[in-house]
Image (spheres, helix red, strand yellow):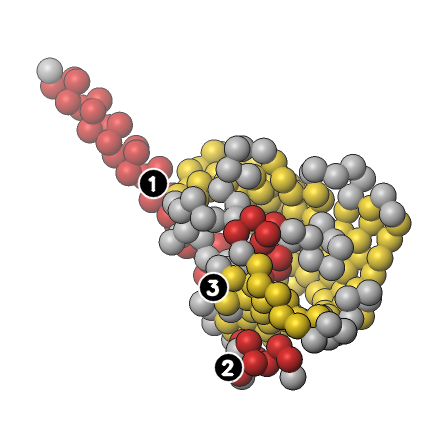
Amino acid sequence: MKKIIAIALSLFTAAGMYAADIDAIISSLEANTVYDTAYSESTMTATGSLGTTESSFKSWSRKNGDTLIEIDKGSDKGQKVLRQGASIFLFYPDAEEVIRLQGSALRDSLMGSDFSYEDLTGDDSISGRYTGTLEGTETVDGRPCWHILLTAKNSRETYRRQEMWIDTELNVSLKTILYSASGRALRELHAGGIRKIDGFNVATRMVMQDLLKKDSRTVLTIENVAINKPVDDKLFSRENLTW
């Protein structure tokens, strides 16, 4: 009996350590990637069956998930994208109208790229939205990484599962696979060009592949970024879209 109790206590302790490990990993990731505010200027090169397109845009975001994107180069020049909670509002200057997106539409392509609206405007927090499990450790691009699996707590999440390989030292996900509710892999993201910016380790080069398309690939390069600097609240209003 004593031996059975000892084994049970040992298993209980190990399970507690396992849970604490994944919580610590997610906490460290969020401490490095979730900001009060952020501003960036980026370029994007998308390659697909119809050739290659280039675009550039500016982006402002704040911690509650609000994001504004202004496209200043490419076929969508002048378009604005505003994220407020679970809704996205698109402004087309030629049509002078605002269109609202919700639900599965958040997985649609942004600017004809392999990045979706959710990918470029979604809330980067994890702990309140996903349950995580630690799958082990692996090497990605020569770097030791935690391999974790995230399962959405809410069925309304755009991606019901995410698989991440998080650099154990830099607290950046070097590889991410995004899944649908049915478990189908939709997109795969590789991150690199890690730089220390405003005290955070930031990936300045990201390569996204839409796994449902053949030979589809988009390279996003962050040219300029500022973290936790003052941002005007008016930027995140729907009225600002038509200015």
Q: State the image coordinates of residue 177 (x, y, percent, origin top left).
A: 60, 41
Q: Which tag, 2 or 3, sits closer to the chain's start?
A: 3
Amino acid carrying label 2: it is Asp
Mark 3: secondary structure: loop
In this orientation, which residue lies closer to the viewer: 171 or 65?
A: 65
Closer-to-camera residue (171/41): 41
Q: How many marks?
A: 3
Type of amino acid at the residue the image marks with label 1: Ala
Give the image quarter of residue 117. Answer: bottom right
Residue located 70% across and 43% down the image: 210
Q: Are marks 1 and 2 in contact (CB under 8 Å)?
A: no
For the point 46% across and 57% down, which residue is it? 125
Give the residue at mark 2: 233
Three-letter code, disc 3: Gly
Q: Which residue is mark 1?
A: 19
In this orientation, which residue lies closer to the viewer: 188 or 233?
A: 233
Instruction: Please report whichever mark, 1 or 2, sits nearer to the chain's N-terminal start.
Output: 1
Q: Is residue 227 visible?
A: no
